[in-house]
Image (cartoon, coloured by chain):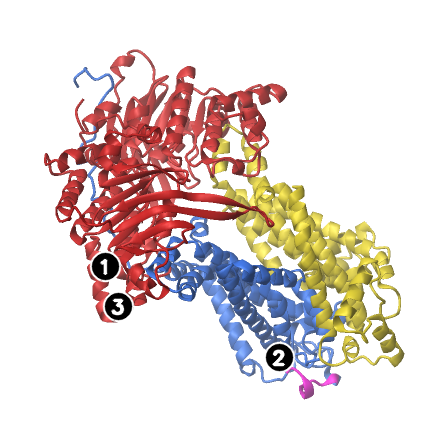
Chain colours: A red, B blue, C yellow
Amino acid sequence: MSEGFTITPDPSREGETPLLQVRDLQITFKTVGGEVNAVRGVSFDLYQGENLAIVGESGSGKSTTATAILDLLAENGRVSGGSALFNGKDLTKLSRKEMEHIRGREIGYVPQDPMSNLNPVWNVGFQVKETIEANTSLRGKAAKDRVIEVLKEAGLPDPASRLRQYPNQFSGGMRQRVLIGIGMSARPKLLVADEPTSALDVTVQRRILDHLGTLTREHGTSVLFITHDLGLAAERAEKLVVMYKGQVVEYGDSKEILADPQHPYTKRLVAAAPSLASRRIQSAVEGKSTPGTVGDAIAVARSEAAQSEVATEAPLISVDNVTKIYNISQGGFRKTQFKAADNVSFQIAKGKTMAIVGESGSGKSTIAKLFLKLEDITSGTMTFDGRDVGSWPKRELLEFRRRVQPVFQDPYGTLDPMRSIGASIAEPLQTHGIGDKASNRKTVAELLEQVSLPADMANRYPNELSGGQRQRVAIARALALKPEVLVLDEAVSALDVLVQAQVLQLLADLQAELDLTYLFITHDLGVVRMVADDVTVMRQGQVVEAASTDEVFENPKEQYTIDLLVAIPGGKFEFGKSA
Amino acid sequence: MPSNHKIQRYVAPVEETPVAAVDAVKFDGKASSVWGDAWKDMRSRWLTWACLALIALIAVVALFPQLFTSQLPTGAACDIANFRQAPGNGHVLGTDAQGCDVYSRLIYGTRASVTVGLVATILATLVGCVIGAIAGFYGGWLDAVVSRLGDIFFAIPTVLGAIVVMQVMPWERNALTLAIVLAVFGWPQIARIMRGAVLSAKNADYVTASIALGVSRAKILVKHVVPNSLAPVIVIATVSLGVFIVSEASLSFLGLGLPLSTASWGADISAGRATLRTDPALIFWPSLALALTVLAFMTLGDIVRDALDPKARARR
Amino acid sequence: MIAYIGRRLLQLIPVFFGATLLIYFLVFAMPGDPIKALFGDKPVPESTLEAIRAQYNLDKPFIVQYLLWIKGIFVGDFGLTYSGRPVADELARAFPITARLAVIALVFEGVVGIAIGLYAGLRKGKLFDSVALFISLLFISVPIFVIGFLVQYFAGVQWGWIKTTVSGQATWSELLVPGMVLAATSLANIVRLTRGSVAENMGADFVRTAKAKGLRRGRVVRVHILRNSLIPVVTYLGADLGSLMVGAVITEGIFNIKGVGGTVFQAVQRGEGPTVVSFVAVMVIVFMLANLLVDLLYAVLDPRIRYAK
């Protein structure tokens, strides 16, 4: 076990006592399989008014560290060593009563998921007010006025009229603002923000973080950010703690670390972060390739694919003025119409990748469903290989299904938990009457190998696989019928950045090898930069801008596209390059 | 440390924080399916074995009562002159008011209870599963009609409905007819649970993926949706078995269940009322048998629920 | 909220007619002579049979019979008992007794069940929790009439704490013990349900956030854990009313209480079919109305229901 490293006072803060001094913090969880050391020797200093970010992948122990500071570990967890001095008091040794006094009042908390962190049965005003009443001497009207003030500060529009509304009447962004309001309501000295915006759209995320920044600066509040997003960390915090498997691998000035990562893990993380490496793909395509990074490999794979392409070929997929209207039941017999896609047009050439990018409600996934023939087009046409998709004859539907295959977002929903991996991958073969039992077993093994998974995985069940492995199995299943087009609906969005880079790499290799055409649906512009030839930006069902990837990134024409680009956290940093 | 840093810089020694391969495939032990995992969890609890042992014993007694007693519980074996004898003298637990052997009525009563419980559960589960699955999966007007129909049956509490039907039923009262009557009022509960499970399973990505593969709707229902919806139904069916056994006993107790010519715990408890003050043992033995049987199935239902719900497993 | 109540009422209409029609159908559309069947093996004078045939309009087509019967229910005419008294009169006498019994049972199972469940849930895995779980399972497994006899035998016969039967007045104090017997099974179910739901809510994100807000433990438990845990308990209560009614038939039978359940019990014992059918029909209607109330309570507790489409 590591000893925990020595923290020396920051030279720029000579003589000051840090607000929060974490020293060699150890956290242990009791599980069925015995004790697990989730956090092993975390140390850092956080000064008054300073922002510090703990960065790491899922399972790195970053959130556990934050919850331990608030003494809110799950029942089976405990601090097994080290200390967390806050204003001279060791938070790990306080009694429940003393801790209740500090929480809310001196340390505020903004949790990760806005959907589950507000109590659904109490109205919003009540939930803010009880926080104020618990931590201040304000009561009655004064407390209510403070509720309104706090929510206004957090950027909730028209708070006075919303106090009696319930959380389920709020959007995710609005709920997050309420949670920020709650966290800041007693003017704490320290705010612990655990992935405060990761569930939100980028533009909403940017607005909320800007707001949070202003608010904490005004009140001189220190912020402890917990995030998986390197860009966000660099942009919002001066200091960085990089965690990996419960340990600190790097600690220091955030811009310095991102510009010049030293630890092999940090290097890897920086190289894989989409918003950054994407800049370098460009140079690689132009032939100034420096091998070794994921982005480069993708670029190389793609440029090979590009060479085999005939420039004057007709587009493989053509979408013309497609509109999709849903009838939404309003209860009883009333119905309203909702235009999920409004006059959408684009084309994809064979062997190319078209990214459709947009925020939630943009209609990007609707386009995927329409093209997969999972939903009917209301008006307009989609053609595939010169034939109309909408009127594709029923008896030839299997042929269409063979040629166009999807991969979906949620790695935990994409495979039937009751069936073995082999059975899942073999399902397309059986459905299309290809091969017998023995030959299918061989095909399954080949497909697993193609997605870099061991052949003996065929006997395993999805519950034993990681998210990235499940997505690779889903890709293998999609490839079983040797399709021409893959529709990737947020296929890498749920994955950790390193795993995401790995899957993107795999997709790029497969495209080069099998001459696949990708319809790539995503909310993440950084990922777009890494994989797409062309981009269609969508908003509220309509196409905002459509052009080649380079053009969209270097010379965006529409304000919304610019907003999206600006909103990418850390977009302005040159990652992995010494400043 | 060069002091041109505004903030201390620390890099962990690589040997202390070795970097593993990204997303390495790592399996230990044998492959485990969802059912396999559940069974593994159940296997490790002694309570499972206690329940299974008790249920096995009950099953053997129900199937082969003659292995446990040489006396018959009814008819000529009862000698009214021999009524209410204390234990002993060839009657291990004595005799009842009719002069029948209490022990052998206990043994033979098992069959009545278990048969009614088992048949009612099987019928209600089959009907409930099929109807619930079809309603949930196909939706639309079919769902509307079937769900309303279920609401109607649901509005009549099972035993109350059974009281009315048993009162007027022109057919012979036996284990089969009683089980059918209980199932008629019992299926909506299982249909509701199945429908809910199907509704959530049918929106899973793996179902959409199968549609995109060209798998037919009916095949998707059978191969993906139903297997993924069965867990809550299995739990409720196990518990229902216990509930139906209690229902049978309640009806027999009221005099609307099995006729007195059939040995039944409920009827014996009812008959024992008359001598509660003087001979409480006549009520005690059938009550104990009934309670143990129901306890075995209820506990098993609990264990299965825990085993099939990973969240509950982690909570334990 | 008003829209929600209206919707629930609308939904109740088809269920009301469906359920009453079903009962009527099960009684009068059975093969053979339904009137004879009502009395089972009991010999009945022809004049009684004739009176009942007339009462149920059996000479008219089935659906007309049903409609006339349901019309009667709406104007408070529930038919005649076996002895020729109007069911409505019997109900007026018996209903208050059963209502008292039900109130005792509901208060007992609600208060004690939720308290034990909450305490066990907060101490999940500790001794109290394990004991509560085991005892509740025992109570669920032992049928209500067994519990009734045990109480009658020990508390009544052996120790002489209570009278083994209840007088015609059926006062609150007389009904206390029978009410607790009636509540036993439901109480056990409520303990288990509350316990599970409290344990689950303890790990909920919003509870962690409530703690992080600086709320005291007592307030977190009361306002955030208990309140949310009551929602499934209320849902259960709806279905549970059905078993309470069956339980009332048995409990009132055992303790010789002259309420609605006791009347059904007596009628069943004596083979007086018409009384059984009329009373059970009334109980089913009460069950439906009570369920409507439970649904409204549910909507009060859970705003998500009110605002769902």
Q: CA distance from mark 3 to mark 1?
A: 12 Å
In the image, taking residue A88 as reference, residue A351 lies left or right, namely left
Residue B104: numbered disc: 2
Q: Chain of mark 3?
A: A
Q: Chain of mark 1?
A: A
Q: What type is the residue that disc 3 sits on?
A: Ile
Q: What type is the residue that disc 2 sits on?
A: Ser
Residue A58: numbered disc: none
In the image, taking residue A189 as reference, residue C251 lies left or right, namely right
Q: Residue C53 at x, y = what percent?
A: 83, 75
Which residue occupies the foreground of this view, A113 or A38?
A: A113
Quadrant for the N terminus of chain C, please: top right
Image quarter of residue C80: bottom right
Using the image, determine if residue B156 lies above or below residue B99.
above
Q: Is residue C30 visible?
A: yes
Which residue occupies the foreground of this view, C105 or C174?
A: C105
The residue drawn where x is 34% and y is 62% is A397
Please rate how many residues cluster around mark 1, counting C-alpha atoms within 10 Å: few if below 14, some from 14 to 19, many from 20.
some
Contact (Cβ within 8 Å) of mark 3 with mark 2:
no
In the image, farthest residue toward the top: A15
Q: Chain of mark 2?
A: B
| Residue at which label 1 appears | A482
Q: CA distance from mark 1 to mark 2?
A: 69 Å
Q: What type is the residue that disc 1 sits on?
A: Lys
Using the image, determine if residue C198 lies above or below residue A436.
above
Circle 2: element type: helix
Quadrant for the C terminus of chain C, please: top right
Using the image, determine if residue C205 lies above or below residue B64.
above
| Residue at which label 3 appears | A434
The residue drawn where x is 44% and y is 28% is A109
Using the image, determine if residue B114 lies above or below residue C70.
below
State the extent of the magenta-drawn residues as a range: B73-80
